[in-house]
Image: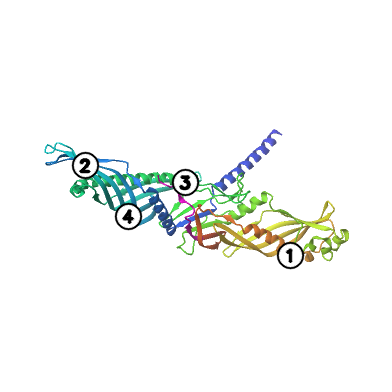
């Protein structure tokens, strides 16, 4: 007996371990892929460059630069420049390049305009008192090149951004003095060109480092779940490291629906053989989002488990169908036993709807039981149960950043599951059930499908001119994106202070 008990314990523990491993694998697998093309990278690069410039300026260089020199007949001359402030930056050209070493962003032909205060003083044996002068100066830095190389990796389901290399190089500086006898001291002030150039390089490099740290903090703070409604969320945690090619970067996320408590296991029958590949016919599109059919099946499984797929139908467009008198020629024994009694239809799904995606469309199979109830006063009497197999074809559309759609009825098969009123002539009931599904079930489903669910898009960005592509077991959204100025990007912590 003891050995038999041990045997059952072993089987039970093995079963639990297997279920836990399946859930863990589901969490670590990717069912949604996001590809950012070269055009998309350029769009994001331009946005970040412009935002970085507006965040940097005005930038006051921290150091006061001093210099002393001994000049014949004048003696020791002490020169100081202070309050050096960058007030304008123009970027002539910039590019982003992907490689094995990371993501390189380079801005070239950059000009930088500064203002500063200048002051000098000297005394000599010829003039026993100290002589000084000062004023303002404008500085133009030309041919500046700014570059950085970034590393991007998955860190516990979020993206971690690291600065691998950075640099700022000044090619040429022009200084123009204002005030005082500025024409007399122009040559002396020109001696500060090297120090000013070094200060500019150092200040901009440090600000870039600060900006990358804040951008990394933002990426790691991105939510791992996107709420869909009060009952479901999308698991948008990242899986594996981003995949870089010469002209695009691909991110893989889990993408399944979750209730925040349990992980919906994915049936091996619908599990993809490999991670989704993103393919857009129009290669100029900035963004491609590929969703495996497992994403849609996880939604149907979640709502099924939450018992949201059970309905009592007591009102229909043709209300006569919910009275036994309306069935007297279809099910005579029903009317004979319960004449002129009201009816309810108790509809419940016997299993989660199954979604299949092909190269042409999205197909759905729904397995439901319809219990015919007779209402006598306060008593509800189940009299028969009919099993339905409903097959439909779905269409999808983009609404803002949501993927929504609708379904139409293609086929309806039915069989009698049980009856308390004898045998039923199913061929007579078939048209009634078709009408009920067409006029009640389909509009009800479309009222929810039409709302859609959110695609994994960062707040502030909106899909533009999107197109939808079907392939075997996948649907792909290919789109350009726009950024709304009303969504203040300064709320995204890449703001440099």
Q: Quadrant of residue 41?
A: bottom left
Precedes in sequence: disc 3 or disc 4:
4
Height in image: 121 above or below 43?
above
- Give the alpha-carbon distance from disc 3 to disc 4, as whole Å: 27 Å
Q: Closer to the camera, 101 or 41?
A: 41
Secondary structure under the numbered disc 1 in the rendered image: helix
Secondary structure under the numbered disc 2 in the rendered image: strand
Residue named by callout 1 = 435
Residue named by callout 2 = 120
Height in image: 477 above or below 263?
below
**Residue 154 visible in the shown view:** no
Q: Residue at x 12, y 36 (%)?
A: 125
Residue named by callout 3 = 218
Q: Closer to the camera, 177 or 290?
A: 177
Read off the magenta span: 478-497
Quadrant the C terminus occupies: top left
- Give the alpha-carbon distance from disc 3 to disc 2, as whole Å: 46 Å
Nearer the observer: mark 1 or 3; the answer is: 3
State yes or no: discs 2 and 1 in contact (Cβ < 8 Å): no
Residue named by callout 4 = 108
């Amino acid at each position: 007996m003891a050995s038999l008990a041990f045997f059952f314990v072993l089987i039970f523990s093995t079963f639990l371990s297997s279920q836990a491993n399946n859930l863990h694998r589901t969490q670590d697998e990717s069912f949604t892929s996001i590809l950012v093309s070269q055009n998309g990278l350029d769009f994001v690069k331009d946005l970040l460059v412009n935002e970085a410039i507006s965040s940097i300026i005005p930038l006051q260089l921290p150091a006061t630069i001093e210099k002393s020199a001994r000049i014949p007949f004048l003696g020791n001359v002490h020169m100081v420049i202070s309050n050096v402030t960058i007030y304008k930056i123009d970027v002539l050209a910039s590019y982003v390049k992907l490689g094995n070493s990371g993501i390189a962003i380079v801005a070239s032909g950059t000009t930088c305009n500064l203002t500063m205060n200048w002051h000098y003083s000297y005394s000599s044996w010829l003039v026993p008192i100290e002589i000084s002068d000062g004023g303002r100066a404008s500085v133009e830095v030309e041919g500046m090149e700014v570059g950085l190389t970034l590393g991007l990796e998955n860190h516990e389901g979020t993206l971690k951004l690291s600065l691998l290399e950075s640099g700022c190089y000044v090619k040429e500086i022009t200084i123009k003095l204002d005030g005082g006898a500025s024409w007399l001291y122009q040559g002396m002030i020109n001696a500060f060109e090297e120090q000013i150039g070094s200060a500019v390089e150092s200040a901009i490099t440090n600000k870039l480092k600060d900006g990358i740290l804040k951008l990394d903090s933002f990426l790691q703070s991105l939510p791992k779940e996107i709420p869909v409604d009060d009952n479901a969320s999308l698991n948008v945690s990242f899986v594996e490291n981003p995949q870089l090619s010469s002209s695009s970067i691909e991110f893989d996320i889990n993408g399944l629906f979750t209730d925040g408590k349990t992980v919906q296991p994915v049936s091996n029958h619908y599990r993809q053989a490999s991670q989704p590949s993103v393919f857009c016919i129009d290669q100029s599109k900035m963004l491609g989002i590929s969703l495996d059919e497992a994403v849609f099946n996880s939604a149907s499984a979640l709502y099924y488990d939450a018992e949201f797929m059970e309905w009592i139908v007591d009102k229909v467009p043709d209300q006569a169908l919910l009275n036994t008198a309306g069935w007297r020629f279809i099910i005579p024994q029903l009317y004979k036993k319960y004449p002129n009694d009201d009816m309810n239809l108790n509809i419940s799904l016997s299993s989660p709807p199954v979604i299949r995606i092909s190269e042409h469309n999205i197909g759905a199979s729904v397995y439901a039981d319809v219990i015919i109830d007779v209402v006598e006063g306060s008593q509800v009497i189940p009299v028969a149960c009919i099993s339905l197999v409903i097959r439909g074809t779905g269409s999808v559309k983009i609404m803002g950043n949501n993927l929504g759609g609708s379904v139409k009825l293609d086929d309806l098969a039915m069989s009698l599951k049980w009856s308390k009123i004898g045998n039923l002539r199913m061929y007579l009931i078939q048209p009634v059930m078709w009408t009920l599904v067409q006029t009640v079930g389909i509009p009800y489903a479309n009222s929810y499908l039409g709302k859609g669910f959110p695609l994994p898009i960062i707040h502030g960005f909106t899909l533009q001119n999107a197109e939808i592509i079907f392939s075997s077991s996948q649907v792909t959204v290919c789109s350009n994106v726009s950024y709304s100025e009303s969504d203040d990007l300064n709320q995204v912590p890449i703001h440099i202070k």
